[in-house]
Structure formats: C-alpha cells, structure tokens
Image: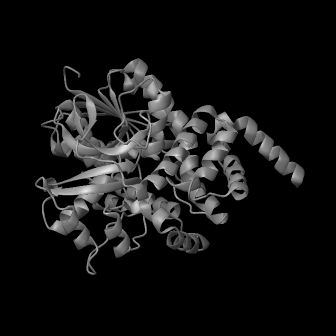
C-alpha cells in the first residue's frame, strides 16, 4: 500500500453509480485513508466523466477529507502503483443494453441485460475489455485487487479466473446485501445484526440460512416473508411478482430477485412483451433516469449523492465494494457474499468455477464461511445449467468462436431453442458488430448471406 495513503482506481468512472462509491469512501475515510482516487473512462464517456468528476470533487471538499480526485482517459496512467481497482463499465453504453433487451423480445424470448441472450451478448462485448484491463493491472500494479462490479459479474469473474494471469480478483453484486437488508427489515432490527449464508451463482444466489446475532432465524424469516402482509423483496430493475408460499416453504431456501426470470418465466415474459410493445424496455427507463441524474450532477450546488440515484437499481453498491476493500486493507474478515473461485466448496461445480458465496474478506482475499453447504438437489439442476452457460459464454468471449457462442445461446434456460436460438445469435452478432472484433469474420459471413437472400 502507498506510503502516503491508498490509491484507488475506478474504470468506468463516468458512470452514474460513481457518487455511490465516492460517498462510501468518504464515510470510511478513517479506516480507508484514500489519498488518490482516479476516475477513468473512454473518449465516448468524457462528458459524463467530467460531470461526475466535478461532483466527486465537490463531495470530497464538503466532507473535508484530503482525497485528491483525478480524471483521465489514460487507463495505464491511472493504474500505475494502484492498491485497488474497481470496474463498472458498459461496452456499447446504454444503446447496446437496449439491443440486448429488445432483440430477444422481438423473437419471443426474455430480454434482460444479465440473463438469457442479453446477458450472453453483454458478456461477449465485455469480457475481452476486462481481460485487457486485467493484463494492464498485472503489469502496472500486480499487487492490486481487482473488484469487479461490471455485469454479468458471474461470467466476467469466470473469464478472469480462467483466462487472466491476474488472480487477485473478486466479483461483487448488490443483490445479496439487498436481501440482507430486507431480512433485517422483516425482523425489525438493524442491518448489522443480520448475517446470511449465501450460495449459488451471480444473479442466481440463494439464502441458505439467516442469522440474527448469530442465532439461526431462517424459519422465522420464511414465515414472515410468506405472510399475506409481507412486502416481497425485489429490486428497482426487476418486477416484484410475489413468490408462491408453498414453493418457498418446500424449498427451505430464499431465492434472489433474479430467480423470477426462471421460476416465473411466463409472468416475466408476458410483462416484458407488454412493455416492449409500448417501447418501454428497462433500457428506455434507465436512459431517461440517467439523463435526469446527470442534470442533477451538473448543479454546482450539489455536494452530496442525490437520493434519486437509488432508483437506478444499484442501491448499496458502494457498501459492498467499499466493505470488500475495507475488509482486505484492514484484515477485518468481514462476511460478504462475493464471486470467487469455488475451490471445492460447492461440489457440483469444478474447482476453477466462479461461484457467489458468503466469505470472510481479509488480507488474503475471500475465504468461504464454514456454514455454507451444498445446495439441495432441486436447486442444483438450474444452477448447473447456468454454470454451463457461463463457462461457454466466457470461452466464446475469449476465443471469438461462433460454435461456442451458439452453444452458449441455446444452453441458456431462457432460450433453449436450437433454430430460433441460432437466428437470434446471428441477428445480435450483426447488431453489436462494432463491439465484437473477435467475431468480425463470422459477422461478415452472416451479412454476406443476408445480402444474398435479399
């Protein structure tokens, strides 16, 4: 760590989420003495970087902490001698997300940025960029921990673990902490009194056991959350269809909000198709929200994170990212659910697979908590199928192999259709060709066939 304080770098610094991180670092300054905070972006994100960066400087000045904010488009300049690197980027920006959602829906499949066909294409665009970043980290700051928040975080972590030389990697997500806070609310207690054994995959993680002051209260939580007057936990970007009481009680597990795409596939698809017909995909909503957020950020009188950011879908993001950094830097052994290497903890997956699991976070990185156990058989089928999809998606993104991408598309349980899956794959490859250089030759062939047909 730096003699004059910590150096933290955020790649994708022009993101609307950045004020969350700035607030988190300010709140923890006594434990995390960050002297340099670098925000990095690309040329297309320069305007947003400057707006967010100006707000970050105002926030730091108001808080009175000696943290210098640096803005740059030069990633390598920022990474030199960094202690921690966080990534929160979106290759293709929000218009690409719009395609990830709308094209699958036009074929009758669920459109979502981290699940199904949309999740596959976000991975195909993102993984090569993240691997390049990891290569720079290994060269310029090899001791730095890479804390990735970029979705699909499970596939990104999978790719980093398998195809990168930089192994100090942790994937983070705000879903588990959101569930923890909802359990605390159900129990009517402070958040810090509740801990949870999470096991599964990113956006497919289950709460196995819930503890209040280290006492197992899982049965009580399930009873409360399945009562008629319960407010079912969800997220700002996911429809809140209620869980079936009999299913939850039979499973003994609590699913995460993203499980609705699988256990409530018909309801979710019908809802998304209705919105799609009105031109109201989540991407359209987010674009409007982002526009209003950045108008707020431009206000020179704004010197704190605006409350409106909570509507963006990334609530508690800074708590997870900053708690992970704090846990490592101060060797706290804080229990946090993260994406990390399985190393034999969940026997249904191989040792090298990325899993999302509750871990002690200390100076040596994540160590799974002892009480996390194997998922029951009913959950193993779906999670194993998703892991097959994740591995194929990561391999396709790394190699640019069309056949691997096709298998990934058809394997995903939100597609599971060979002919329509191939047609969807081809259309999305062409739609995203600007951001898929590894697939250039196959996209050229697809376009050639399309021209011949017309």
The residue at the far bottom in this view is 228
Can residue 12 be seen by looking at this rendering?
Answer: no
Instruction: Count numbered badges in the picture.
Output: 0
Q: Name the colour scheme.
A: one colour
Which quadrant is the N terminus positioned in?
Answer: top left
Question: Is 403 or 234 nearer to us in this picture?
Answer: 403
Residue at 49% x, 52% y is 114
- Location of residue 400 (image quadrant): top right
Q: Does residue 330 appear to the left or right of 302 in the view shown? A: left
In which quadrant of the rendered image does the C terminus lie?
bottom right
Question: In which quadrant of the rendered view does residue 325 lie?
Answer: top left
Residue at 26% in and 77% down: 227
Is residue 118 shown to the viewer in this render? yes
Question: Could you say where residue 192 lies in the image, as x and y percent from the top left?
Answer: 14, 53
Residue drawn at x 32%, y 43% as measured from the top left: 338
Horizontal side, residue 212 vs residue 118: left or right? left
Residue 283: x and y in percent read 51, 60
- Please tell me in which quadrant of the rendered image residue 354 appears: top left
Residue closest to the eye, 331 or 266: 266
Q: Residue furthest front?
A: 377
Residue 40 in the image: above or below residue 314: above
- The structure residue drawn at horizontal position 55% and vertical position 73%, both measured from the top left corner, is 270
In the rendered structure, the answer to whether residue 178 lies left or right of residue 244 reads left
Q: In the image, residue 316 lies at what x, y percent?
A: 28, 53
């Amino acid at each position: 760590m730096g003699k004059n304080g910590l150096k933290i770098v955020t790649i994708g610094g022009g993101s609307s989420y950045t004020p969350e991180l700035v607030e988190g670092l300010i709140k923890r300054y006594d434990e995390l003495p960050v002297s340099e905070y670098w925000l990095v972006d690309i040329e297309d994100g320069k305007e947003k970087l400057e707006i967010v960066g100006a707000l970050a400087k105002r926030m730091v000045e108001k808080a009175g902490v000696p943290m210098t904010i640096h803005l740059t488009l030069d990633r390598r300049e920022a990474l030199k001698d960094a202690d921690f690197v966080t990534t929160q980027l979106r290759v293709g920006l929000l218009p690409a997300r719009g395609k990830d959602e709308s094209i699958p829906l036009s074929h009758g499949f669920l459109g979502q940025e981290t699940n199904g066909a949309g999740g596959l294409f976000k991975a195909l665009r993102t993984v090569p960029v993240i691997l390049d970043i990891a290569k720079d980290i290994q060269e310029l700051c090899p001791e730095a921990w890479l804390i990735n928040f970029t979705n699909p975080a499970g596939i990104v972590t999978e790719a980093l673990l398998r195809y990168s030389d930089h192994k100090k990697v942790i994937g983070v997500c705000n879903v588990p902490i959101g569930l923890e806070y909802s359990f605390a609310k159900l129990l009517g207690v402070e958040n810090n009194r509740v801990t949870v054994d999470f096991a599964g995959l990113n956006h497919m993680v289950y709460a196995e056991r819930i503890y209040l002051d280290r006492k197992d209260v899982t049965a009580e939580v399930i009873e409360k959350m399945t009562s008629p007057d319960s407010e079912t936990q969800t997220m700002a970007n996911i429809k809140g269809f209620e869980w079936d009481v009999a299913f939850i009680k039979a499973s003994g597990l609590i699913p995460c909000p993203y499980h609705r795409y699988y256990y409530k596939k018909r309801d979710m698809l019908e809802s998304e198709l209705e919105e799609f017909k009105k031109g109201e995909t989540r991407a359209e909503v987010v674009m409007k929200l982002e526009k209003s957020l950045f108008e707020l950020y431009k206000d020179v009188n704004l010197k704190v994170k605006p409350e409106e950011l909570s509507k963006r879908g990334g609530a508690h993001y800074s708590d997870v990212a900053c708690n992970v950094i704090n846990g490592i830097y101060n060797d706290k052994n804080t229990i946090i659910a993260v994406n990390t290497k399985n190393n034999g903890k969940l026997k249904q997956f191989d040792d090298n697979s990325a899993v999302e699991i509750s871990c002690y976070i200390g100076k040596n990185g994540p160590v799974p908590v002892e009480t996390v156990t194997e998922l029951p058989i009913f959950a193993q089928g779906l999670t194993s199928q998703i892991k097959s999809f994740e591995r194929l998606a990561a391999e396709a993104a790394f190699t640019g192999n069309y056949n691997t991408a096709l298998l990934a598309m058809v394997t995903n349980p939100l597609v599971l259709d060979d002919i329509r899956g191939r047609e969807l794959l081809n259309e999305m490859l062409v739609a995203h060709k600007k951001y898929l250089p590894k697939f250039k030759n196959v996209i050229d062939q697809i376009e050639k066939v399309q021209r011949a047909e017309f």
